Image (cartoon, helix red, strand yellow):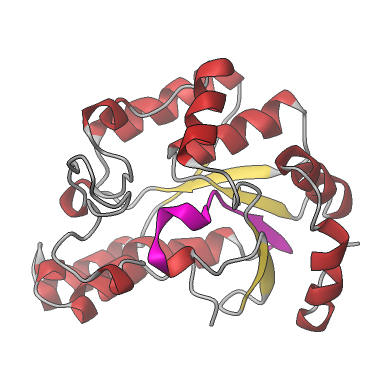
Amino acid sequence: MNTIRLSELNAIKKTIQNKSSIELLNWVSENFSNQAYFATSLGVEDQIITDMIVQNDLNIKIFTLDTGRMFNESYDLLAQTELKYGIKIEIFNPESRDLEKLVIKDGINGFKKSIENRKRCCTVRKLNPLKRALSDANIWICGLRREQSVTREDMSCIEWDGLHAIPKLSPLIDWSEKDVWNYIKEHKVPYNKLHDKGFLSIGCASCTRAITKGEDIRAGRWWWEAPEHKECGLHSQK
């Protein structure tokens, strides 16, 4: 199997519905040779998936998006992860000319002025690089969990990504926060030290803050916006 059509997705869902996370990743590795791509944000969920891919020698390519506004701790974790696992994670950056146009139009911090501005920034820094990263992919993998956000509650472990016309697999979709941290500790997986300082969901430094006890997991992302708007567009199903 090299490609999945939208019309085949329901049948695929039935085939993989009872598989564990590692079984799902093995299924991808076996059926999408050289065309399976894992997009890591270096969050704890994605660090787990990286660990599973490397430890099981799976045929899945790993890449990340560097928006140019990441925390220093995120860059440190990237280097630490490559060193621990003996791998090179491919990095996709925004096009410099697109960034120049964005800053000229909206200003250096214009993303806080409106949702439209913020989404335009995410498009330049994330969506366009992702499109380049997935240009040869027939399936992509990410670390989404239903528990993370109200915008993700109804997601299945495999969804159709209409923007890239390929399926998207979330092997940790049913994991709880406790499941995630149990795995991190048991397998000694490196993680971003900002998590120990109240940052549960980490993106760009300019758009992420620590949260307080009782707040939603993603309350620290784009905290000036309503919860239902807190997606950058990477995980749109349109």
Q: Which residues are magenta?
A: 136-150
As drawn, 49 above or below 142: above
Q: Quadrant of residue 111?
A: bottom left
Q: Closest to the observer: 235 or 11?
A: 11
Write the residue at 62% across / 28% down.
51
Give the image quarter of residue 136: bottom right
What is the number of callouts on the image?
Answer: 0
Query: In this picture, is 138 found above or below 173?
Result: below
- Residue 17 image offset from top left, x and y in percent: 79, 58
Seen at 49% across and 67% down, the residue is 235
Residue 17 appears anywhere in the view: yes
Residue 184 image point, x, y percent: 51, 24
Q: Is residue 172 above or below residue 99?
A: above
On the rendered image, what quadrant is the N terminus found in? bottom right
**Residue 17, above or below 73:** below
Q: Is residue 175 left or right of residue 147?
A: right
Q: Position of residue 185 (x, y in %)?
A: 50, 18
Q: Residue at x 8, y 69 (%)?
A: 107
In the picture, measured across the screen, residue 100 lies left or right of residue 176, that is: left
Name of the residue lying farthest toward the right:
1
Q: Residue at x 32, y 40 (%)?
A: 200
- Foreground residue, 217 or 124? 217
Asked if the magenta segment contains residue 130, the reply would be: no
Can residue 234 be seen in the rendering of this structure?
no
Residue 92: x, y in percent?
A: 46, 51
Q: Does residue 171 appear to the left or right of 105 in the view shown?
A: right
